[in-house]
Amino acid sequence: MSDFSRLLPDEPLPQRISRILAWAAGAIVLFGCSLLITIDVITRYLFKRGMVESFEISGYALAACIGLGLAFTVTSKANIRVDILLDVLPGKVRIVCDIVASLSLALIAVALAWFAWGTLAQSWALNAKSVSQLQVPMVLPQGVWCVGLVWFACMAVLIPIQAIARLMAHDRAGFEALIGSLRVTEEIEQSGVENPAAGVEARS
């Protein structure tokens, strides 16, 4: 029971939705894609031709995985930040840098969602289909991709708002938890290593 509760942490609903979408991207899309590729490899070996267009579907799956996983990247602070000088800056300057970085990411996320929606709308208007034998309506893979990017934009905008609200409430720890740069110990915890020092001693 305790192991299952660790998989479903007590977190706000938007963050939990982001986690579920990331799980869907990894568990359903990637595993489903690997199954199709396996079928294609076996049928090509046995019948000299593939039964499914695994290459095309894999491309759609990759785009879906990226879109659905971006929001979780924001909530878990897994996006790359160049913060080599951040620790030597005064506390107030670090706060400003964190807010600027978070708002910059939000701006990029909104722009990506806007152009993704435009692409989806154009495919819908033109009734665009893939040029392969599958003739897949492009609104299907683009729709999943667009949903992920729109939710990414929502979370990228919501997170700095939540952080600023906590800062105004004098909750510096809550602010750091939302948009503060990860420290080395936090990165170790995210990697799943509970006690790295014990591991070093065991190897020695």
Image (tube, grey):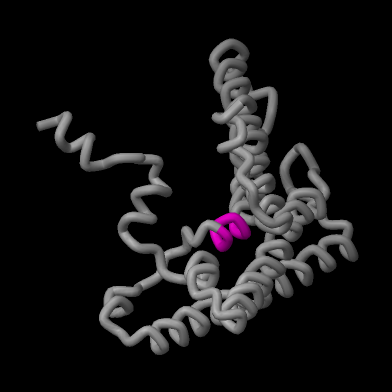
7 vs 188, left or right, is: right
Residue at the front extreme, as displayed: 170
- Any part of residue 56 in sight: no
198 vs 124, left or right, is: left
Give x and y (percent) for residue 101. Answer: 49, 79
At a point 17% along the width and 37% down the height, the residue shown is: 200
Residue extent of the magenta highlight: 70-75
Quadrant of the rendering where the N terminus is positioned: top right
Say above or below: 132 vs 173: above
- Any part of residue 130 in sight: yes
Q: Which quadrant of the figure has residue 116?
A: bottom right
Q: Is the magenta stretch mostly helix, strand or loop?
A: helix
Residue at the left extreme, as displayed: 204
Give x and y (percent) for residue 115. Answer: 71, 73
Residue 188 among magenta residues: no
At a point 26% along the width and 81% down the height, the residue shown is: 88
Q: Nearer the viewer, residue 15 or 164?
A: 164
